[in-house]
Image (cartoon, rainbow, N blue to C red):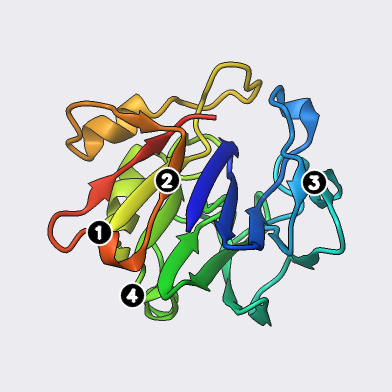
Amino acid sequence: MVITWYGQSCFKIQSGETVLFTDPFAKEIGLTPPRGQANIVTISHNHFDHNNSEAINGGSLVIDEPGEYESKGVDIKGILSFHDDKEGKERGTNTIYIIDMEGMKICHLGDLGQAKLTAEQVEKIDGVDILMIPVGGTYTIDEEMAAEIINQIEPRIVIPMHYKIPGLTSKIEGVDAFLKEMGVAKKETVDKLTLKKKDLPEGDMQVITMRI
C-alpha cells in the first residue's frame, strides 16, 4: 500500500492497480487539486475543500454518505458523525470512513468536529491500524481534542491532516501544536508512505507527518 498526501484531507491510497482518493479539494483553497485515475473516491462532507470528485478522472465509485460498500476488493464503511460539537447545528454532518485494504484498516475522520467520539462510534471504528485525523482547529478538532480522540481509537499509526501549510488560504493552525501535544520532539516528514501489514508497529504508536 502506498499513501500520498495532497493537503487538507486529501490522500491517494493505492494497492496494486486499485486507487482510492479521499476528500479531493477545489483550487479555491490555494493548493493544486489532485489529478489522476481512481476506482473509488470518498467524500466526508459537501464542502468545496472536500468534495471535488470531478478532479478525478474515470468512472470512479463516489461514496458520500454513511453505509457499507465494497469495490475492487476494498471494503469501506461510512459512519455518521458531526462537523461541529453541537450535533451538526453549526456545520452539519460528517462521514468517518473505515477503509479495509491489504488486511489493514484505515480510518479517515474527515472534518470531524466532535470533541469526543460516542461509544457507538468507537465500537464501529474498532481495530484501526492507520488513523488520518484533522488537527488544525477552527473548522475541525484542535490538537487537544485530536489527542483525546487518538486515545479513544488507539491506532498503530497516526497521520495528521487538515492543518496550515504553505499556499493554503484557510485560517487554521499548523501541525506543530499537535506534535507538541503528542510529545513528538522531532518532526520528520515523508513524501510517500509505503506499508505492508508486517511493517505495522507492534509497540508504541507512531505519528507520521507527510508533505505534498
Q: Is residue 5 above or below residue 81?
A: above
Q: For residue 169, say whether it is visible.
A: yes
Give neighbour class at mark 3: few <14, some 14-19, many 20+ (Cα, 10 Å): many
Question: Which residue appears at 86% of the width and 48% of the height?
Answer: 54
From the image, tell me which residue sits under label 1: 151
Find residue 181 and report its horizontal and vertical position in percent.
Answer: 23, 36
From the image, tell me which residue sits under label 3: 52
Q: Amino acid at mark 3?
A: Asn
From the image, tell me which residue sits under label 2: 193
Q: Are marks 1 and 4 in contact (CB under 8 Å)?
A: no
Q: Amino acid at mark 2?
A: Leu
Q: Amino acid at mark 4?
A: Gly
Q: Are marks 3 and 4 in contact (CB under 8 Å)?
A: no
Find residue 102 and report its horizontal and vertical position in percent.
Answer: 46, 72
In this view, the mark in front (1 or 4): 4
Q: Secondary structure at mark 4?
A: loop
| Distance Cα–Cα, label 1 vs label 2 | 23 Å
**Nearer-the-camera pick, 103 or 78:** 103
| Distance Cα–Cα, label 3 vs label 2 | 24 Å
**Nearer-the-camera pick, 73 or 128:** 73
